[in-house]
């Protein structure tokens, strides 16, 4: 009866994962594609753990050589895959915070090495009693080095929790709470399951996190411009009003309005696909020029807005210089059959004068067009 209950819990979790995998809009940008690949890897590895966990209960203690091979093989795979959901969570968290492919690749290297070492130990346990033991009655029990494995798993989940907590200021409250939904419940579940062998907690708890993450991904997608991967106009309006309303704590709200010069000419001479590439190039330059906590948004058409908090308004000119230098470097590379040029409006929000988001954007727009006319 207990085995049937465990299998039903695992089966329910698998159905939920299948729904998460098949649901949702599948359109992705280059940036969101990375997020989806990591999330789908979490889904796949958690589903594998649910299947292996169920199979271990089905075959455990059954007589015969076939059952013995199944018990040994299933448990070896169980330990080999065990680390992967946490590894993928750490990478998912890193990308949620920094949105940086290069950083993500560096963060993945030690985690891949760790997962590989666990897989080797799991494979070796088939022949030598390391992580698990299968007795003459084909019953599984923990091996002599299981405590080492448990400490490593606790350490990995603990690192994930510390990583989320350390970067709390670099993410929204919603994302922070969502990310906490993995390591905190998992640590509690792992502690309980370690002392009460037979409980089914780890992977159903992980499934609950995957549900929360799905909502987070859908929310991000609803707030992201499909083509460029920057925030969309809805996100811009909400974030601008939020930043105007909060206490600045010694910081100044600054904004840039970026317009691509002669964008229509790029479309007319090289086609709309070239125009799309130009928008993507500028978005990439802007995202790489600002900090994690700054906002880059496509306002519409070929216009982008950047919101930043600086201690000194003069820092805004340094940011403009970084953006213009990056554009010149892109032009010098001759990767595109056209040159990019920008008109960049600047504005500093003055709390003493008040004004809402539309007022601030109007000031930015006026300054940008004045600078564009001065070039003519």
Image: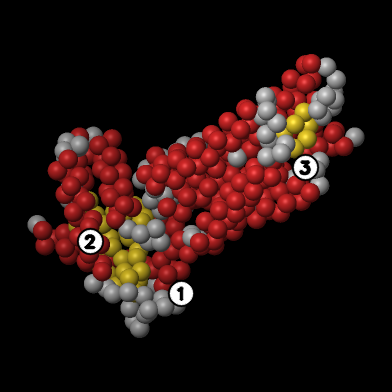
Residue occupied by mark 3: 200
Q: Is residue 110 above or below residue 304?
A: above
Pick the residue in front: 263 or 322.
322
Q: Is residue 104 above or below residue 185?
A: above
Residue at image x 44%, y 57%?
234
Relative image position of residue 46 (x, y in whole percent): 64, 37
Alpha-carbon span between mark 3 and mark 2: 55 Å
Nearest to N terminus: mark 3 or mark 1: 3
Pick the residue in front: 294 or 196.
196
Q: Are marks 3 and 1 in contact (CB under 8 Å)?
A: no
Q: Are marks 2 and 1 in contact (CB under 8 Å)?
A: no
Tell me, what colour scheme is on the image? Answer: secondary structure
Q: Which mark is residue 14?
A: none
Element at label 1: loop
Left or right side of 301 for 141:
right
Residue occupied by mark 2: 320
Alpha-carbon span between mark 2 and mark 1: 25 Å
Residue occupied by mark 1: 246
Relative image position of residue 376 (x, y in whole percent): 9, 57
């Amino acid at each position: 009866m207990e085995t049937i209950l465990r299998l039903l819990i695992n089966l329910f979790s698998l159905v939920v994962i299948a729904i998460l995998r098949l649901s949702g809009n599948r359109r992705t940008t280059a940036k969101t594609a990375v997020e989806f690949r990591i999330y789908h890897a979490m889904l796949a590895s958690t589903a594998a753990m649910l299947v292996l966990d169920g199979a271990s209960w089905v075959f455990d203690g059954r007589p015969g050589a076939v059952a013995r091979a199944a018990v040994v093989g299933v448990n070896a795979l169980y330990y080999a895959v065990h680390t992967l959901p946490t590894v993928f969570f750490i990478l998912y968290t890193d990308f949620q915070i920094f949105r940086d492919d290069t950083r993500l690749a560096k963060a993945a290297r030690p985690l891949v090495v760790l997962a590989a070492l666990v897989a080797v130990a799991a494979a070796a346990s088939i022949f030598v009693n390391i992580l698990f033991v299968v007795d003459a009655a084909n019953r599984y029990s923990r091996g002599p080095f299981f405590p080492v494995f448990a400490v490593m798993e606790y350490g990995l989940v603990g690192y994930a929790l510390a990583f989320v907590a350390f970067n709390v200021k670099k993410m929204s409250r919603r994302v922070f709470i969502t990310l906490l939904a993995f390591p905190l419940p998992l640590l509690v579940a792992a502690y309980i399951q370690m002392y009460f062998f037979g409980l089914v907690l780890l992977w159903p708890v992980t499934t609950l996190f995957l549900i929360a993450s799905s909502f987070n991904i859908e929310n991000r997608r609803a707030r992201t411009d499909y083509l460029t991967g920057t925030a969309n106009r809805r996100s811009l309006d909400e974030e601008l009003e939020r930043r105007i309303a909060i206490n600045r704590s010694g910081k100044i709200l600054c904004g840039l309005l970026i317009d691509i010069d002669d964008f229509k000419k790029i479309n007319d001479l090289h086609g709309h696909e070239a125009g799309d590439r130009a928008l993507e190039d500028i978005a990439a330059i802007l995202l790489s020029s600002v900090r994690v906590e700054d906002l880059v948004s496509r306002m519409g058409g070929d216009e982008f807005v950047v919101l930043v908090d600086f201690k000194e308004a003069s820092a805004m000119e340094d940011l403009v210089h970084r953006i213009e230098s990056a554009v010149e470097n892109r032009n010098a590379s001759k990767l595109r059959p056209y040159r990019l040029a920008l008109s960049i409006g600047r504005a500093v929000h003055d709390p003493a004068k008040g004004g809402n988001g539309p007022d601030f954007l109007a000031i930015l727009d006026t300054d940008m067009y004045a600078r564009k006319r001065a070039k003519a």
